[in-house]
Amino acid sequence: MEPSLALVFFLSMLASIVGTLPFGPINLSVVDTSINRSWRAAFHFSIAAALIEIPQSFIAIRFNPTVQQLLQHNLWVKAFVVVFFVALGLVFFCRKPASPQSKKTKLKENDFLHGLLVSIANPQAVPFWIFILAFLKSAEYLDISDHPPLFFLCVFLAGVACGKLLTLLFYAFLSQLIVQRAAFVSQWMNKIIGAILIGIGLFQGMREVLAL
């Protein structure tokens, strides 16, 4: 018996929320955008990230065995993950806090494009969805083959995008709330975000070295 479309949407949205909650390059970039630019800029960034999550989860569905083998045995992919996190962390850590004048200038930047680029470069998305699909199948909640019915696939991907968007907007709202109550946080936010990303990158690198 096939699951209802409502259940498919709910499970994919819930999985997307769970995957977006832990600190990573996308949600930390949303926090940075919300604090150093504006809520509107963070909204545009979040929409772009949610749209990119759709093809990334589709790749996990359609090419699961191939991608899984590539991720497990390709050292270049693992090295890229480490370099990506550390490099992005250094960019945040070394960047000076935005002044009111620079915030006005930054409003002209294309935050949607920024969201697209950061999301495309994010190395975590496809492996996460491979894991989620395997978990849903093993727990007998949902079994998505590599050629699911079109309407079934569309509902699943819609849930993925909605979960991503809602979680990122929650981060943007929360960061605005914190800054309004503690203005000094914005002065240190770049270094906090940078330190978290560098820490994630170094942890990934150490884990891969120990696994050799």
Image: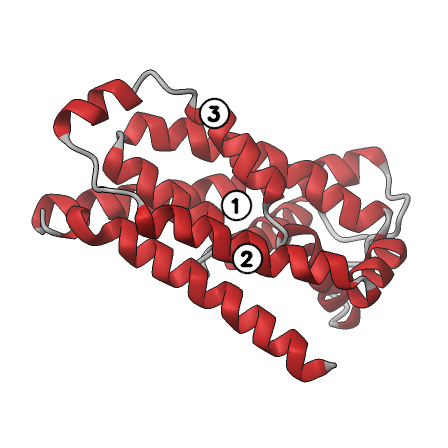
Q: Residue at horizontal 80%, vertical 49%?
A: 61
Q: Secondary structure at mark 3?
A: helix
Q: Residue at horizontal 59%, vertical 32%?
A: 51
Q: Which labelled disc corresponds to residue 163?
A: 1
Q: Is residue 191 left or right of residue 83?
A: left
Q: Residue at horizontal 48%, vertical 65%?
A: 200
Give the amino acid at mark 3. Phe
Q: Which labelled disc corresponds to residue 122?
A: none
Give the amino acid at mark 2. Gly
How far, Cα to Cα, is label 1 from label 3?
Answer: 18 Å
- Pick the front one: 1 or 139: 139
Which is more foreground, mark 2 or mark 3? 3
Residue 193 percent across, percent down from the top left: 34, 54
Mark earlier in primary sequence (2, 3):
2
Q: Are marks 2 and 1 in contact (CB under 8 Å)?
A: yes
Which is more foreground, mark 2 or mark 1? 2
Q: Is residue 192 above or below residue 153?
A: below
Mark earlier in primary sequence (1, 3):
3
**Quadrant of res 9:** top right
Q: Which labelled disc corresponds to residue 19?
A: 2
How far, Cα to Cα, is label 2 from label 1?
Answer: 9 Å
Give the amino acid at mark 1. Gly
Q: Is residue 172 visible?
A: yes
Which residue is labeled 3 in the image?
Answer: 112
- Pick the front one: 98 or 54: 98
